[in-house]
Amino acid sequence: MKNPIPESSLIQLPKGPPRELPRIQHAFTTDELGKAHNETQYFRRDAVRKAAQKSWKSYRAFAWRRDELAPQSLTGKDNFAGWGATLVDSLDTLWIMGLREEFDEAVRAVGAIDWNKASSSHCSLFETNIRYLGGLLSAYDLSSQEILFKKAVELGDMLFAGFDTPNHLPANSYNFKKAKNGELKASSRQSLAVLGSMSVEFTRLSQLTGDPKYYSIVERLKSGLEKTQEQTNLPGLWPKYIDPIEGTRPSSDTLFTLGAQADSAYEYLSKTYLLLGGLDPSYELMHIKAMDAAVKHLLFRPMLPSGGDDDTYEAGSPPPDILFSGNAVSTQRDKSELQPRVQHLGCFAGGMFALGGKLFNRPDHVQIGEQLARGCAWAYEAFSTGIMPEVSELVPCEKAEREAEGKNDHLAQCPWNGAKWRQKKKKEAAAAAPAAMNTRFTLDTNSQTTLPKPFTKLLDSHYLLRPEAIESLFILYRITGKKDLLDIAWRMFQSITKATETKFAFSAIEDVHIQNPGQPTTKTDSMESFWMAETLKYFYLIFSPEDGAAEGSGEEGVTLDGWVFNTEAHPLRVPRPRS
C-alpha cells in the first residue's frame, strides 16, 4: 500500500467474551406450531423453493458465472465486474434451501474466480462488499468450506486497498489500475450508505481471520460518523450525502432519508452491535439517537379512509394502523419539512426498528417497526398487481389536522379528507405530463389519475424484484410470532410471482399500477442477484420452521439471535457467550 496504516495504529476488536444480550426472537410454543400450521407453511416454503430452483436452473443454463441472467432474452449481463454476482450472492440461499448439489457446483465455480480479471475497469466498493464479500462470508459461516474462506480473504484484501488513500477514507468508485498504483482518492462527497455499510462484513472478517486491519478501518469510519451525529441540521440523523473530509455542511447537506443512499448505514448500527456481542456501547447510543430522530422527522402516518369513507373497509371499521418513512428537508437546525415520499428500499425500516427495539429494550420501537412493516404490506395490496411501486407519494396526516382532533402525537391518526386528496392528485397529474419529458421513467398520466387512496403520485412505477417488504415481515414475524403476518407474506409472494414470472425465470416489471388487473405486466428483462440472495431467501425463511432449521436436517437454525443478516440478506454467525 502506498498509504499504509502503521501496525501500532490498528484498532483491535473489543476485548472480552460477548455479553448475554436480550432475546430477540419470539419463544414459539408447540401450541402455536401445530400440525395444521406446519403443513401450511411447508407447502408455502416448497413453492418458494421451486421458484428459486427455476431461477437458478435458468441462470445455470444461460448465464453461468455471469453477474445476472436476462430472464427474457436468456443471456448474461455483467453489471458488477463480471465475477459472477448471482453465483456468489446465491450461495447461502442454496445452502439454506437444502440444494446441496447446486451449492457444491457453485462453490467449485467460486473457487475459480480471479479477482484480477474483471469485465470493467472499476467496481463499486459498496456493492462488491455487500454482494460478494457478504455472500462468501455467509456461505463459509454456514458450510465451513475452506475455499470460501480463502476467497473471502482474497476479496477482503482487495477491498481493503480501497482505503489506500491519503486520509484512509474509501474510494467507492474502485478503479483497479489506480488501486494497484496507489493512486486512489476518496470522493469529496459520498453517500451515507457507502461510509456506514461495511462494518458488518469487515468486522466479521477480522473475527474470522484474527487480523484487526479490516475492523480497524471501519471503526475509524464509525468514529467519524459518531462525531458528526449531533452536528447536522437534524441531530441524530446524517444527511443523504456527506463530505467525509470536511464533515457535514448544514447549508447544502439538507436532505435526510432512510431510503436510497442512506439506508444500510442506519441498519448496520444495531447489527454491528449484535455482531460484536454488545461490547461496543457506542453503536447502541448511535442507533437510539438515530431512530428517535427518525421518528420525529422522517416517519409519518398516511391520511386513510375509514369504513364510512371507502368501500375498501367494512362500515364503521377504523383505518389500518400503519406508518411510512419519508424524506425530510432541513435548512435550519432541528426543523424539517416532510416529503411524504415512500421508497420500496425504505421498507427495510420496519425490521430495523423492531430488531433494535428488542435488542435495546425499546418496546415502542418494536411497535413502530410493526406499523412500518404493515404499512408496506398495505401498500402492496393497494395496487392492482398486489405489489407496491419503487417510489410513490401519498397524503400524510398533517399537524393542523391532528390538532383539530385534539391530538398532540405527531403520528396519531387523522380524519379522511377526500377533497384534499382529489385536489392534490389532480395537481400531481397535471404536473406529470411535462415532467415525463425530463425523466427516464415512463409516467402514464392516465395511470396517475386512477391511483388508490391516498396515493397522489407515482415517481417510479417499476417493481425490481426487491426484498425490503418481505424482509421486514420476516423479522416482525420472528419477533412477535403474529401469525397473520404469514398470510400477508403468502399473498405478497403470490402477487409477485404472478406479475413477474417468465417462461424460464422471473423479471422486474415496468408498472405495478396496471388499469386492468387481468392485463399482463410489461417485463423489463432484468433479474438482479438480490432476487435469489434476498427476496426468495426471506420468503423461504418466513415459511420455514421457526428455529430456522430445515425439517430433519439436524442443523443449527438461522435465528435472529444467532445470526446477523447483512444488507444483502447474508446471515453471519454471531459469536456466543461462553456457557
Image (spheres, helix red, strand yellow):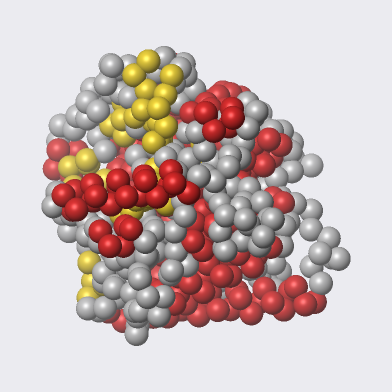
- Where, by quadrant of the figure, is residue 452 drawn? bottom left
Q: Is residue 286 left or right of residue 213?
A: right
Which image quarter is the N terminus in? Answer: top left
Residue sitting at 39 percent across and 58 percent down?
Answer: 451
- Who is closer to the viewer here, 572 or 390? 390
- Where, by quadrant of the figure, is residue 68 drawn? bottom left
Residue sitting at 44 percent across and 77 percent down?
Answer: 498
The answer to whether residue 231 shows anywhere in this view is yes
Residue sitting at 16 percent across and 49 percent down?
Answer: 434
Residue 233, compared with residue 307, is above or below; it is above
Residue sitting at 69 percent across and 55 percent down?
Answer: 316
Q: Position of residue 247 (x, y in %)?
A: 32, 18
- Who is closer to the viewer here, 524 or 421? 421
Q: Is residue 310 left or right of residue 515?
A: right
Q: How many marks?
A: 0
**Most extreme residue toward the right, as rendered?**
31
Residue 248, compared with residue 502, is above or below; it is above
Q: Position of residue 33 (x, y in %)?
A: 79, 67
Which image quarter is the C terminus in? Answer: top right
Q: Position of residue 456 (x, y in %)?
A: 38, 50
